[in-house]
Amino acid sequence: MQRRVAAIHDLSGLGRCSLSVIMPVLAASGAECCALPTALLSSHTGGLAGYTYRDLTDDMAGFARQWSALNIPFSALYSGFLGSARQIEVVSEIFSQLKGPKTVVLVDPVMADHGKLYKTYTEEMAGRMVELCRHADIITPNLTEAGLLLGLPYRGEPKMEEEVTEVLRRLAELGPRKVVLTGVSRGKMELGSAGYDRETGSYYYAFAPRVAGSFPGTGDLYSSALLAGLLRGKELGQAMQIAVDYTQGSIARTWAAGTDPRLGVNFEAGIPGFIKALGLNE
């Protein structure tokens, strides 16, 4: 059966992030990616000044209404960056319209990093993101976003495994069956993610060598690769490691080339290895 994903994200004209990353990654995995844009930007907001921004809230319901009327089945619904507080309610309604009995709902609560909200986000939006996470089967927050969802102050990277498992468990109590926390470190040399499956009680970890610097769009790359792995039948820990390896390889390739990190990472050159890791060419 054709795997089909409704990707509810923004589109930035410049800079590898959001839909410009998510669509090719999911396509490489064999899934049809249907874009439902939340906002249109001339570039992403991470260090690129003078960007333009258009909120597409009023257009979103029409996308979902047509898709629902056409009775198009979706394997997954995947939301990320949202342009306004009102969009949280709109996306919740879209989930209700398009979700089928076997549809996986992944919410990436894209709203903050390094202890700070993104420029287009407000405290109200951050608070209401919890509502959207209650509709999800899987959520993929980073450490800052996890703290906002739980009402905890940002304290940097957790120092002990017990702290990570406590955060994962509390996030699962919000409603999702699976939680993946990104930006988790193991010592000073490795960075990756930690996961928790509430139904089995299992915890998972996936790491790769740390690369210095900050690279916009890597959260979108990770979450789309994770979803691709899950849709290909990988168990959570396997999908996490595939996503970590693909993301880290893209970061390392970009760092080695010395290109402007503000423009995102070179994920394109890693697509053949990603396809192999998914087992598509076996």
Image (cartoon, grey):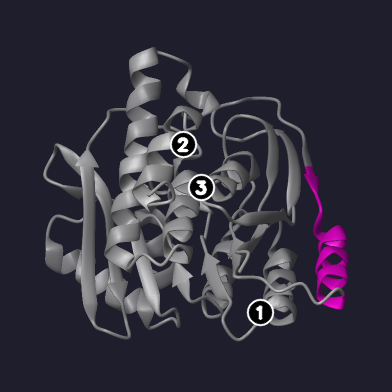
Going by the image, does 253 lie left or right of 78? left
Going by the image, does 200 lie left or right of 133? left
Q: Which sits earlier in the primary sequence, circle 1 or circle 2?
A: 1
| Badge 3 density bin: few <14, some 14–19, many ≥20, Cα 10 Å | many
- The residue under label 2 is 271
The part of the chain drawn in magenta is 54-69
Say what amino acid the circle numbered 1 marks. Lys
Q: Which sits earlier in the primary sequence, circle 3 or circle 1?
A: 1
Residue 60: which quarter of the image?
bottom right
Going by the image, does 224 lie left or right of 172? right
The foreground one among 165 and 271 is 271
Q: Which sits earlier in the primary sequence, circle 3 or circle 2?
A: 3
- The residue under label 1 is 99
Residue 89: which quarter of the image?
bottom right
Q: Is residue 181 visible?
A: yes
Q: Circle 3 — which element?
A: helix
Structural distance between the alpha carbons of marks 3 and 2: 15 Å
The foreground one among 52 and 227 is 227
Structural distance between the alpha carbons of marks 3 and 1: 22 Å
Q: In the figure, 39 relative to 5: above or below?
A: above
Q: Is residue 119 visible?
A: no
Instruction: Give coordinates of residue 71: x percent, y percent.
Output: 80, 77
Say what amino acid the circle numbered 2 marks. Ile
